[in-house]
Image: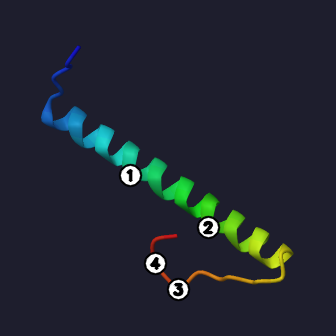
């Protein structure tokens, strides 16, 4: 079933989706840093304004 969104609803949903992507990416990066450190092959993210 296809649902039609108004412009405002579409923008709100897009913001919510982008927020979810960024928060999940941040959590993933933290996990990768922790696991790599535990394994003795420390990895660190590059500086970024996003996460």
In this rendering, position of residue 50 left or right of residue 3: right
The disc at residue 47 is: 3
Q: Nearer the viewer, residue 48 or 6?
A: 48
The disc at residue 3 is: none
Question: Which residue is label 4 attached to?
Answer: 49
| Location of residue 1 by image quarter | top left
Question: Which residue is label 2 attached to?
Answer: 29
How crowded pointer 2 is (Cα within 10 Å; few <14, some 14-19, many 20+) is rated as: some
Q: Nearer the viewer, residue 1 or 47?
A: 1
Residue 11, percent from left and from top: 24, 43
Residue at left 59%, top 81%?
45
Residue at left 52%, top 86%?
47
Q: Gap in Å between the C-alphas at discs 4 and 1?
A: 15 Å
Asked if marks 3 and 1 touch (Cβ < 8 Å), the reply is no
| Location of residue 35 by image quarter | bottom right
Which structural element holds mark 4?
loop
């Amino acid at each position: 079933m296809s649902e039609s969104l108004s412009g405002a609803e579409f923008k709100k949903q897009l913001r919510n989706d982008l927020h979810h992507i960024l928060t999940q990416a941040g959590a993933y990066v933290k996990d990768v840093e922790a696991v790599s450190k535990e394994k003795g092959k420390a990895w660190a993210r590059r500086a970024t304004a996003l996460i």
